[in-house]
Image (tube, rainbow, N blue to C red):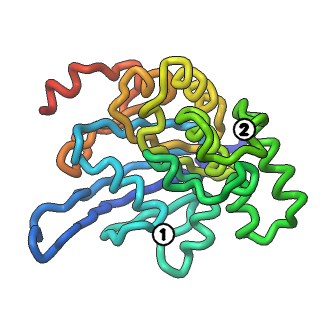
């Protein structure tokens, strides 16, 4: 008799997650409202919704960057104050404005920052940073000042910093914003090759269709449908939900 294999642990599990901002002034209007979902390794989930629907806030939950109610787990670890350091080592985060996560005057130092924070030796850190830059087609940027780069180059540098630690989960906030068609195509190809679980918040439906395996629609902080295959993602979805 063939042995039964237990299903793999999701890289992200959210159970009844609610986030409330400005509770005193708006106690009844959560930014994220009772969201439950799972993402497994290799799955790429697009979070789609209008401005203010809660997409960015939902991305902040697994990284422990906002207080929340409910339960969140990353690769089996609960997102709690005592576990945040370990949880964040399993996550790569790309902010919607890549300059927000570019801190150092040399690309190689910036990309290797997360590894240095873990105590890795400088030579190993630089070697791994160079390898991820090469993988993203940005090896020639290693010695440059990030603020001399184009927008597309900055996105690749920020993504290299998010991926250098080989995270279980990538959280990407509008990664295709401000990129030209060539830059979008290059980034989509890079993301499709990733084996991490991925949650991608975006307004860019053509980009989401190229990258993501599934999508779900967020409206006023609530998921209005279960994740569906991304080949069904179209502009009509916005018209139906508006």
Pick the residue in front: 215 or 155.
155
The furthest residue to the front = 148
Image depth: mark 2 or mark 1 in front:
1
As drawn, is 174 to the left or to the right of 128?
left
- Kindly indicate whether the residue at mark 1 contacts the one at mark 2 (C-beta within 8 angstroms): no
The furthest residue to the bottom = 82
Q: Can residue 34 be seen in this snapshot?
A: yes
As drawn, is 184 to the left or to the right of 117?
left
Image quadrant in which you'd find residue 200: top left
| x and y, in percent, of residue 73 in the image | 49, 62
Task: Calculate the distance from the C-alpha at mark 2 to the C-alpha at mark 1.
Answer: 36 Å
Of the two numbered discs 2 and 1 on the same chain, state the one appearing first in sequence. 2
Above or below — where is 229 with respect to 46?
A: above
* Mark 2 secondary-structure assignment: loop
| x and y, in percent, of residue 159 in the image | 60, 43
Residue at position x 43%, y 27% in the image: 208
Residue at position x 23%, y 67% in the image: 20
| x and y, in percent, of residue 142 in the image | 77, 43
Where does label 1 land, which residue? 79
Above or below — where is 183 with respect to 175?
A: above
Tag 2: Cα neighbours inside 10 Å, few (<14), some, or many (≥20)?
few
Where does label 2 land, which residue? 2
């Amino acid at each position: 008799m063939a042995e039964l294999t237990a299903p793999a642990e999701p890289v992200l599990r959210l159970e009844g997650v609610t986030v409330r901002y400005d509770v005193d002034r708006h106690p009844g209007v959560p930014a994220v409202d009772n969201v439950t979902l799972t993402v497994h390794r290799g799955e790429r989930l697009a979070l789609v919704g209008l401005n203010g629907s809660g997409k960015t806030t939902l991305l902040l939950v697994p990284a422990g960057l906002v207080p929340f109610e409910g339960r969140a787990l990353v690769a089996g670890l609960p997102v709690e104050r005592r576990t945040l350091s370990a949880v964040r080592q399993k996550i790569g985060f790309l902010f919607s404005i890549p300059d927000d996560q570019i801190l150092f005057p040399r690309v190689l130092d910036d990309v290797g920052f997360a590894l240095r924070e873990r105590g890795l030796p400088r030579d190993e850190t630089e070697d791994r940073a160079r390898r991820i830059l090469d993988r993203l087609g940005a090896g020639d940027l290693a010695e440059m000042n990030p603020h001399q780069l184009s927008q597309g180059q900055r996105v690749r540098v920020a993504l290299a910093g998010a991926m250098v630690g080989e995270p279980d989960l990538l959280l990407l906030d509008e990664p295709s914003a401000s990129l030209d068609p060539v830059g979008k195509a290059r980034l989509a190809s890079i993301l499709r090759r990733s084996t991490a679980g991925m949650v991608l918040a975006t307004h860019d439906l053509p980009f989401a269709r190229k990258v993501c395996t599934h999508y779900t629609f967020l409206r006023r902080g609530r998921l209005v449908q279960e994740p569906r295959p991304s080949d069904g993602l179209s502009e009509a979805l916005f018209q139906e939900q508006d």
